[in-house]
Image (cartoon, rainbow, N blue to C red):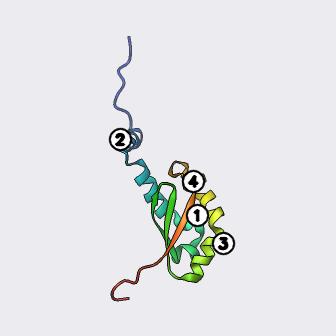
Amino acid sequence: MREKKGPGSVGDIIPAALRLLGLEDRMNEGRLVKDWSLIVGDLLASKSGPLEIRDGLLIVEVRDNSWMQEIRFHQKRIIEKINDRFPDLGVTAIRLRMERVRDGE
């Protein structure tokens, strides 16, 4: 007699549902934002942040030119760390953009 299989655990169902809905990459992008300081270090993370990924291109917002240069210097290492941690994102390059000035700052 065959055992009837249940629907599975929530830990199995959610990732499968996200994949089916095409949302798995968005979830990984959210994890990248959350783990940014683990990837680039606390100081650099306080001066920059990932915004989005488009076709392997990671868009990173940076506070000023000096930090932009710092990220450029470490770009290869940052991409390697991202791809080690989140291989499904397929980051191949980083585009840097200056942080927007927000009203009231």
> Pointer 1: residues within 10 angstroms few (<14), some, or many (20+)?
some
Q: Earlier in the sequence, mark 2 or mark 1?
A: 2
Instruction: Give the residue displayed 37% in from the left and 83% down from the top.
Output: 102
Quadrant in which residue 92 is drawn: bottom right
Q: Which residue is mark 4?
A: 85
Cα gap from disc 2 to disc 3, whole angstroms: 39 Å
**Marking on residue 101:** none
Q: Earlier in the sequence, mark 1 or mark 4?
A: 1
- Residue 48 placed where, x, y %? 51, 74
Q: Earlier in the sequence, mark 2 or mark 4?
A: 2
The amino acid marked with disc number 1 is: Ile
> Pointer 3: residues within 10 angstroms few (<14), some, or many (20+)?
few
Q: Earlier in the sequence, mark 2 or mark 3?
A: 2
Q: Earlier in the sequence, mark 3 or mark 4?
A: 3
- Residue 87 placed where, x, y %? 55, 49
The amino acid marked with disc number 2 is: Ala
Cα gap from disc 2 to disc 4, whole angstroms: 21 Å
Cα gap from disc 3 to disc 4, whole angstroms: 20 Å
Q: Are marks 1 and 4 in contact (CB under 8 Å)?
A: yes
Q: Nearer the observer, disc 2 or disc 3? A: 3
Q: Which residue is mark 2?
A: 17
Q: Nearer the observer, disc 3 or disc 4? A: 3
Q: Which residue is mark 1?
A: 39
Q: Would you place residue 18 above or below residue 47 in this image?
A: above
Cα gap from disc 1 to disc 3, whole angstroms: 14 Å
* Local SS, label 2: helix
Quadrant into which the C terminus falls: bottom left
Instruction: Give the residue displayed 39% in from the left and 39% down from the top.
Output: 16
Q: Which residue is mark 3?
A: 73
- Whether residue 38 sits left or right of residue 17 in the image: it is right
The amino acid marked with disc number 4 is: Arg
* Local SS, label 3: helix
